[in-house]
């Protein structure tokens, strides 16, 4: 299986990639810098240069893969906008993946707890749940979305054939104090 991974040099991704490769999968990781590209290569992954702001590039990478694992987030937004800005930046990314993968049956695994509506609901969120508290809601191709207007070409029926799952991740995957990921 050809798997596209974002956040491959980060806390979770640096453990996910070797496991996928050991299981016989072909992995391509997103790298925004030379250091990240070298780290991905060292893990055994192919490298796709780009960043999370290149939505067309993310759609292309998703379409070219047999599945996507998205464990990256826009850390650069934390100092100026905090968690709300980071969560808001995820919305167009998820819509881009949804557009690329709709109707294909290809899996999308997205991990992260920041901005998750499930935190406020006490259970995993679904596409039928309302937007995050304080946000404005727009019906996206696959359900309510906070502060994001879907492209005019998108179907607003909510029938895109995507399945979503909320998976808990361990906070102990890497010993405390280990170096952070390359940028």
Image (cartoon, rainbow, N blue to C red):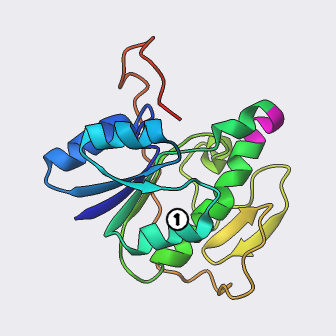
Q: Is residue 81 magenta?
A: yes
Q: Where does residue 87 sit, x and y in percent of width and height?
A: 69, 47
- Relative vertical location of residue 74 with respect to residue 80 in this rendering, above or below: below
Q: Where does residue 28 sit, x and y in percent of width and height?
A: 34, 56
Within-10-Å neighbours for mark 1: few <14, some 14–19, many 20+: many
Q: Residue at x 53, y 47 (%)?
A: 32
- Relative vertical location of residue 77 with respect to residue 163 in this rendering, above or below: above
Q: Main secondary structure of the magenta part?
A: helix
Q: Where does residue 118 sit, x and y in percent of width and height?
A: 61, 47
- Relative vertical location of residue 65 with respect to residue 44 in this rendering, above or below: below
- Place residue 178 in its image quadrant: top left
Q: Residue at x 67, y 44 (%)?
A: 115
- Place residue 37 in its image quadrant: top left
Q: Where does residue 175 sit, x and y in percent of width and height?
A: 37, 15
Q: Is residue 175 left or right of residue 130?
A: left
Residue holding disc 1: 58
Q: Is residue 84 left or right of residue 120?
A: right
Q: Residue at x 34, y 69 (%)?
A: 65
User: The magenta stretch spans which residues?
Assistant: 80-84
- Place residue 120 in its image quadrant: top right
Foreground of the two, 159 or 177: 177
Q: Residue at x 37, y 73 (%)?
A: 64
Tally the marks.
1
Q: Helix, strand or loop at disc 1?
A: helix
* Any part of residue 127 in sight: no
Image quarter (top left, top right, bottom left or bottom right) of the N terminus: bottom left
């Amino acid at each position: 299986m050809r798997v596209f991974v974002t956040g491959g040099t980060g806390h979770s991704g640096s453990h996910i990639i070797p496991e996928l490769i050991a299981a016989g999968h072909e992995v391509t990781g997103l790298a925004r810098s030379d250091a990240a590209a070298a780290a991905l290569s060292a893990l055994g992954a192919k490298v796709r240069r780009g960043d999370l702001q290149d939505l067309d590039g993310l759609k292309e990478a998703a379409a070219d893969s047999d599945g996507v694992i998205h464990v990256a987030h826009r850390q650069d937004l934390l100092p100026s906008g905090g968690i709300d800005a980071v969560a808001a930046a995820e919305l167009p990314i998820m819509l881009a993946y949804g557009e690329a993968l709709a109707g294909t049956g290809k899996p999308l695994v997205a991990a992260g707890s920041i901005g998750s509506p499930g935190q406020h609901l006490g259970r995993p969120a679904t596409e039928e749940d309302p937007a995050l508290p304080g946000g404005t809601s727009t019906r996206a191709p696959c359900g309510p979305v906070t502060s994001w207007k879907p492209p005019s070409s998108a179907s607003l029926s909510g029938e895109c054939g995507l399945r979503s799952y909320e998976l808990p991740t361990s906070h102990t995957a890497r010993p405390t104090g280990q170096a952070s990921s390359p940028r």
